[in-house]
Image (tube, rainbow, N blue to C red):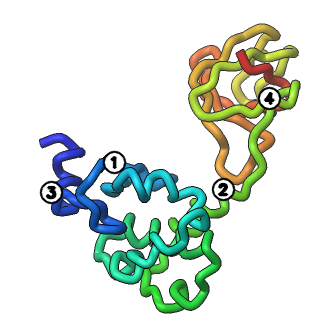
Amino acid sequence: MSMDKVLLNRAGSKCELCGSQEGLSVYAVAPKEDAIVMCETCLARVDTPADNESHWHCLNDSMWSEVPAVQVMAYRIYSRLGKQEQLDMMYMEDDVKAWAKQGLEAENQEPTRDANGTILVEGDSVSIIKDLVVKGANFTAKQGTTVKNIRMVPGDPTHIQGKVNGSTIFIVSAFLKKL
């Protein structure tokens, strides 16, 4: 059974936030590799919930879900809306609350930028703009080397992670140019 079918079965073929059965899709709840089923209405408003605050009254029920990923999304939406009373009411295990807060902190973090100020995102390809001595690996990452499928360093917008000469290394983003 595919992951989508497992999620749909868990959700009862409805949005795990508002209960709608229309336009369902899987929504990844970063930074963990977990997901929930979300309708197109919730999906369109999840990053800017204040655009239709009345829609989120549905969280009064879904915040009590036993599914940690649903709790995390309810917490994040209430946080974005500034609904401290609802946040205080929620019961969450410490690790689930930390997960919820981690996602909110990532939203507020400065973006990672290359030497030209271009915003870098996970999966981008970049070029090294000057020779860099790689400490502990006994090689120099040469100017012009392409680093594909970069990864962001959580909590540090000045570095990226990527593979050079078969080794995964951390590189200061100021020495990179997006391709």
Q: Is residue 10 left or right of residue 95?
A: left
**Within 10 angstroms of label 4, few (less than 14), some, or many (20 or more) residues?**
few
x then y, percent, for residue 12: 16, 62
Count the marks: how many?
A: 4
Mark 1 / mark 2, whichever is N-terminal: 1
The one nearer the camera, 108 or 18, is: 18
Q: Marks 3 and 4, how far apart in space?
A: 42 Å
Mark 3 / mark 4, whichever is N-terminal: 3
Secondary-structure class at tag 2: helix
Secondary-structure class at tag 4: loop
Extreme residue in the top direction: 144
Find residue 9 and name its label. Answer: 3
- Quadrant of the snapshot with the N terminus: top left
For badge 3, the amino acid type reads Asn
Mark 1 / mark 4, whichever is N-terminal: 1
Q: Name the residue under label 2.
A: 107
Q: Name the residue under label 4.
A: 118
For badge 4, the amino acid type reads Thr
- At horizontal 34% and vertical 68% (from top left) the residue drawn is 18
For badge 1, the amino acid type reads Val
Mark 1 / mark 3, whichever is N-terminal: 3
- At horizontal 75% and vertical 44% (from top left) the residue drawn is 111
Q: Marks 1 and 3, how far apart in space?
A: 12 Å
**Within 10 angstroms of label 2, few (less than 14), some, or many (20 or more) residues?**
few
- At horizontal 74% and vertical 20% (from top left) the residue drawn is 178
**Within 10 angstroms of label 1, few (less than 14), some, or many (20 or more) residues?**
some
Extreme residue in the left direction: 1
Q: Are marks 1 and 2 in contact (CB under 8 Å)?
A: no
**Within 10 angstroms of label 3, few (less than 14), some, or many (20 or more) residues?**
few
Mark 3 / mark 2, whichever is N-terminal: 3
Mark 2 / mark 4, whichever is N-terminal: 2
Q: Name the residue under label 1.
A: 26
